[in-house]
Amino acid sequence: MFVDRVSIEVVAGTGGSGAEAFRREKGVPRGGPAGGDGGRGGDVVLVADGNLSTLLDLSYRRHYKAERGRHGEGNDRTGRSGDDAVLRVPPGTVVRDEDSGEFIGEVVADGDRLVVARGGRGGRGNARFKTSTRQAPRHWEPGDEGESRRLELELKLIADVGLVGEPNAGKSTLLATVSAARPKVADYPFTTLTPNLGVVDAGDFRTFVLADIPGIVEGAHEGRGLGHQFLRHIERTRTLALLVPLDAMDPQAEYDRLRTELRAYSPVLAETPHCLVLSKADLMPAGDPLPEVDAPKAWGRFVISSVTRRGLEELVEGLWQRARKAETEDAPSEDEDDEEWWTP
Ligand SMILES: Nc1nc2c(ncn2[C@@H]2O[C@H](COP(=O)(O)OP(=O)(O)OP(=O)(O)O)[C@@H](O)[C@H]2O)c(=O)[nH]1
Ligand SMILES: [Mg+2]
């Protein structure tokens, strides 16, 4: 099961109260105030855990509470602070306040921490209220309440390549053919309801993550169909592959619709480099010429069939080059000074 969005309620610990106490010692007839401060309440903290890939664990339990601070004690002893409540989430988790919609923060890399509800301060004990004119104050403070809020957590997949296409274009079939992922495939539209990820092996230890999202239909940016709500999952990819099946009525129109929807949804996606992938090549009657598709912005075009595996090697190689090669080469080299400048 894939869970990419959960709502939870978090309550940080309340601070402990300050104590009211007086020194009672042999030989000290009128000991002064000695009530310690209350301890801090624990925070609720999200920590990114690279071993997790879904928010599933958090969906079973909706309420998370950090420990309260202990009350202060006599002899000027401060109460112990409450323990934090630590919630492990996958990297790429974005946090919003559910009621206001306010963006609270995100954890991106393994080990990132984000405090989502602060524990209350401990109250001051009576020892703190002693003044020259008030030698025996009875005054103490309660601890502050811990923050409480309702949160919406959302997982943004971190994929290198995103597959975009109308329903039935063959996106899931392609993902299943080039990776170990086993998404559902069927000959009706909207088979895919939530994103699927797969690791594609381009050989020689070269891998990249491919995301298959539900099909995009015309008007998706206005909320039609399903694809739109998942486009955000591919906003951070390095390249997109726009799939147009060769049995489409009008491949050019289908490609244009996809571009229009991407543009309408987000300028980021419209600017993300893309290639054109003409799928289901096995359905073309032998000898028929390929349809002309004008795609001046595409960095490449591929003709594939997931059934006969035609063109898959070239596609995987092309996607790897676009998605990961630059990254690998950008890694700082040891003898950078020796490098020559290359001008195209
Ligand atoms: N002949 C042929 N059929 C294909 C090929 N790829 C996919 N199909 C068929 O096309 C249909 C749709 O495939 P899917 O992979 O589910 O399509 P999708 O783009 O993921 O569709 P949605 O999830 O609904 O958006 C299925 O019946 C597949 O078997 C191909 O290369 N050749
Ligand atoms: Mg699918």
Image (cartoon, rainbow, N blue to C red):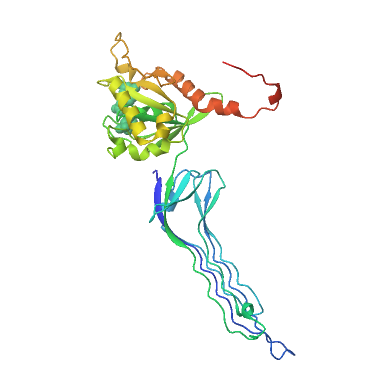
Above or below, comparing residue 201 to residue 232 in the picture:
above
The percent position of residue 44, horizontal first and vertical second, equals 51, 58
Residue 194 visible: no
**At x 50% / y 44%, what residue is drawn?**
91
Closer to the camera in the image, 299 or 208 = 299
Hey, which residue is sitting farthest right in the picture?
Answer: 27
Q: Quadrant of residue 303?
A: top left
Above or below, comparing residue 224 to residue 137 in the picture:
above
Q: Is residue 248 left or right of residue 22?
A: left
Q: Quadrant of ligand 1?
A: top left
The percent position of residue 129, horizontal first and vertical second, equals 62, 79
**At x 51% / y 23%, what residue is drawn?**
321
**How many marks do you count on the picture?**
0
Residue 155 visible: yes
The percent position of residue 162, horizontal first and vertical second, equals 42, 31
Q: Is residue 165 left or right of residue 56?
A: left
Hey, which residue is sitting farthest top in the picture?
Answer: 287
Closer to the camera in the image, 307 or 226 = 226
Hey, which residue is sitting farthest front in the picture?
Answer: 133
Q: Quadrant of the N terminus?
A: top left
Q: Quadrant of the C terminus?
A: top right
Closer to the camera in the image, 278 or 207 = 278
The percent position of residue 259, horizontal first and vertical second, equals 35, 27
Above or below, comparing residue 237 to residue 60 in the picture:
above
